[in-house]
Image (cartoon, rainbow, N blue to C red):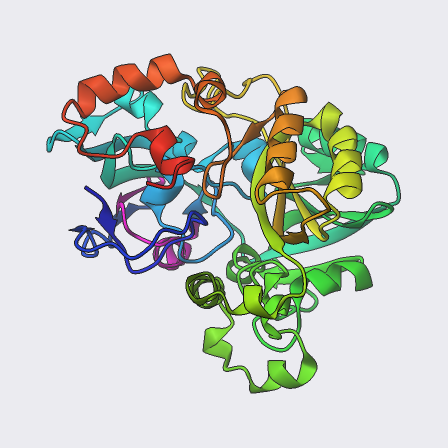
Amino acid sequence: MRLKKATSNLFRFRGDQPGGLDVGRFNRVLSVDRDARTAQVQGMTTYEDLVDATLPHGLMPLVVPQLKTITLGGAVAGLGIESSSFRNGLPHESVNELDVLTGDGEVVTARPRDPLFRGFPNSYGTLGYALRLEIELEPVRPYVQLRHVPFRDAAECAETIAAVCAERAHRGTPVDFVDGTVFSRDESYLTLGSFTDVAPWRSDYTGNRVFYRSIQRSRTDFLSVRDYLWRWDTDWFWCSRAFGAQHPVARRLWPKRYLRSDVYRRIVALDRRFGVSARLSKAVQEPVIQDVEIPVAALPRFLDFFHREVGIAPIWLCPVRLRDPAGWPLYPMDPDELYVNVGFWSTVSLRPGERMGDRNRLIENEVAALGGHKSLYSDSYYEETEFWQHYNGAGYRALKQEFDQGNRLPDLYAKCVRGR
């Protein structure tokens, strides 16, 4: 049994498969309670629609993943993250309860003390599908002021991340959002966002201007709250350049409504299907599309490894600390540790003697050596025994036995590594 979805933000591409469970109508925000700061939301609701429903009430989800068509159910069953994660954790940590259609065909209401509630994050639809969720919301102010703080040294950048996240301030100014961009070994920036009621100007990166380029060119900026939340979606961070969407002429001709991450992902899916770029490339290219969580103290070592062995740039940084000290069994991060999500999304040319997947495998080994974790939305190359060591095989098997005795849903390793 699989979902039939119109959109996806996963990068584990499979061939076309017939059928699927059509959940397209579970896509509504059912209600927003301004006083309680909660919302009742169906699982296939996109964050774009969720934000549009909550902002008129002066509220937003505690964590809004950076791409518009990520669904709430997908972010909770997988792992979402954004620049509020240093104070609000991951999207599933602001869920009060959820209704899950399990592999056994039952609809189970799961709450924080229930095993399914704790084990649902990082299960990627292998235990069941979220039909309805009650989530917490937080108040917003009209604008976000951005400060782009430059660094020439990865160690200094990591130290500043740790200090800002501990103090929730930088040089006396409160900080509500933190993320970063690494352009090269000796050029990186932290972008510190602060809610504000006034803005002397307001930038617009939904048209001809490109947000990530502004980080290098200015030190201060202002965005509306909505534009801040979707600042990365217009150009899929920086990945739209692969399709020519950042070329000045193409930019003027490209319809504004198609400057969206879901449009670019469809182009990638078509390219994977028909192999156009592979035929045009002079070298064999390995996709390296990953997000990993690294303890902040180990960030300089990981970046040094990455620049040396992989060489993709830019790189995204996003600090995260778990909000719930009980932790989450299928993605066992230390709740006392500040991690930095490192995101990189491109291709590399195979080196002499390398096989497809070798560079990704090298990254997996380094992440494990540094006490980090890797998200499973893209290709993985773990051996099965190693995989279950990282993702709590014993705990997963107990949940699978309780909620999917007939194995109607795929196994987590089979789905995320073998692509079944």
> Residue drawn at (29%, 57%), measured in percent from left and top?
16
User: Residue 237 at x, y = what percent?
Assistant: 60, 58
Residue 36 sits inside the magenta stretch = yes
Residue ID at (25%, 39%): 130
Q: Position of residue 317 (x, y in %)?
A: 67, 42
Q: Is residue 40 above or below residue 146?
A: above
Which quadrant of the figure has residue 270?
Answer: bottom left
User: Where, quadrant-wise, is the N terminus in this rendering?
Assistant: top left
Where residue 391 appears, as percent x and y from the top left, is: 45, 22
Asked whether residue 42 is drawn in magenta, I would say: yes
| Residue nearer the viewer, 372 or 326 | 372
Q: Which residues are magenta?
A: 35-59
- Relative to 20, does residue 379 appear above or below in the rendering? above
The spot of residue 355 in percent (x, y) is 61, 43
Res 218 seen here:
no
Left/right placement of residue 63 relative to residue 98 reads: right
Task: Residue lying at the far front in this picture: please name it.
Answer: 353
Foreground pick, 140 / 69? 69
Identify the residue at image location x=63%, y=78%.
208
Is the residue 236 above or below the residue 329 in the image?
A: below
